[in-house]
Amino acid sequence: VAVIEPGLLGRVAEFLPAGGALFVVTTEPVRRHWGATLERGLAGRAGAHLLELPDGEPHKRLASVESLANQMLERGADRAATIVAFGGGVVGDVAAFLASIYMRGIGLVQIPTTLVAMLDSALGGKTGVNLAGGKNLLGTFHHPRQILVDPLLLNTLPEREYRSGLAEAIKYGIIGDPELFQYMAANVAALRQREPGVLERVIAAGLRQKATVVAADEREGDLRRILNFGHTLGHALESATEYRHFLHGEAVAWGMIAATGIALRLGRVNEAEAERVRRTILALCAPLPAVTIAPERVLACAASDKKAHAGRLHFVLPRAIGQVEITSEVPVETILAALAEL
Ligand SMILES: NC(=O)c1ccc[n+]([C@@H]2O[C@H](COP(=O)([O-])OP(=O)(O)OC[C@H]3O[C@@H](n4cnc5c(N)ncnc54)[C@H](O)[C@@H]3O)[C@@H](O)[C@H]2O)c1
Ligand SMILES: [Zn+2]
């Protein structure tokens, strides 16, 4: 369901459903940079409405969903309407949630504008908003009818947001696509310069990898957890710093390095592969905000995370580039040592 093409936004009308009104949900920065291109791409299509969600993670909450729904109703949105999520993961999650419940569910198109959204949140059908007590605690599953990716949109993304997305991209290589890993390692400079052709290939490979895992998971149940590579300790780093010190992808970059350190200590991966993994992550994502929290605190946060099952922490560990395993058998000293090394 994904179309990936530099310049796609400028002729987006041909990829959108022909009937029904369109409700484009976006944020102010995205509208400022890309609103005019979108308008040109819509080619004067009748019945297109632009709705703005105030920017930032704090607005990913139920009140925003209700407010957007009210605006849609005022403008006459019925069951034939389609919601277009035009933004990063916050817009994607809120707009998709809204699409899944507005009049018991209407069509959704994702036009992701951050690398994280292009590689991750636009695909897979997870929608959601946060509660005061935690992230993504209210949500539904609702798959988009289309995912439209224009790598040129990344040109205006703030540098840290962009690099943070590269961490999620290399994750797909490490968990299951050695060719993607090689390609990214060989194209570090082009990636850092956001070359659209290189990005097109990386995004396509990443989405293919996620789609494969998600599709297999619908049958098998547990496979989706490999997508959490780097996330057990990454989430812990984020929550230990109240989500203020690291962007998600930056924390995941450290989390992947720590998981690789654990695998090395347990003899599950060899030194040369582990070193390539660490070197490539840093080449793509550095400079990363320093880890200044005590390993014991990070571990305590990991243990209280909702992903800890029955008190046991699960880790996705690399065996080799392109191959991972899930284990809950990691001694506490090994986790602490790998964290201390960061
Ligand atoms: N549903 C899923 O499967 C899934 C997966 C991963 C992440 N998420 C969610 O995604 C969210 C994070 O998404 P994100 O990292 O995209 O952050 P974000 O949506 O907050 O976007 C980051 C910032 O970049 C701005 N921006 C977006 N596109 C831009 C562009 N092209 N040019 C300039 N500025 C632009 C945004 O307005 C925002 O200020 C989290 O809430 C997370 O829970 C969901
Ligand atoms: Zn992630």
Image: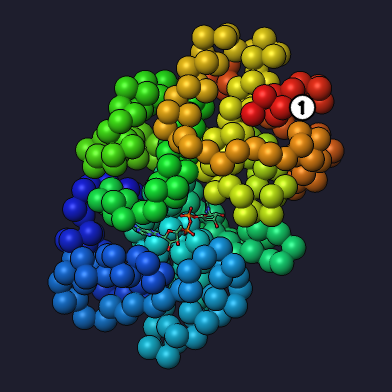
The residue that mark 1 highlights is 336
Colour setting: rainbow
The spot of residue 128 in percent (x, y) is 58, 62
The spot of residue 162 in percent (x, y) is 40, 46
For residue 330, above or below residue 96: above
Residue at position x 18%, y 61% in the image = 10
For residue 250, above or below residue 19: above
The spot of residue 109 in percent (x, y) is 36, 62
Q: Is residue 242 left or right of residue 156?
A: right
Q: Visible in this render: residue 155?
A: yes
Residue at position x 56%, y 41% in the image = 289
- Callout 1 environment at 10 Å: few (<14), some (14 to 19), or many (20+)? some
Residue at position x 61%, y 73% in the image = 62
* Quadrant of the snapshot with the C terminus: top right
| Residue 312 occupies quadrant | top right
Disc 1 is placed on an element classified as helix
Q: Tell whether circle 1 marks a residue whose Cβ is less than 8 angstroms from ligand 2.
A: no
The amino acid beneath tag 1 is Leu
* Residue closest to the eye, 160 or 239: 160
Q: Is residue 55 left or right of residue 295?
A: left
The spot of residue 304 in percent (x, y) is 80, 45
Looking at the image, the residue that sits furthest to the right is 311
Q: Visible in this render: residue 172?
A: no
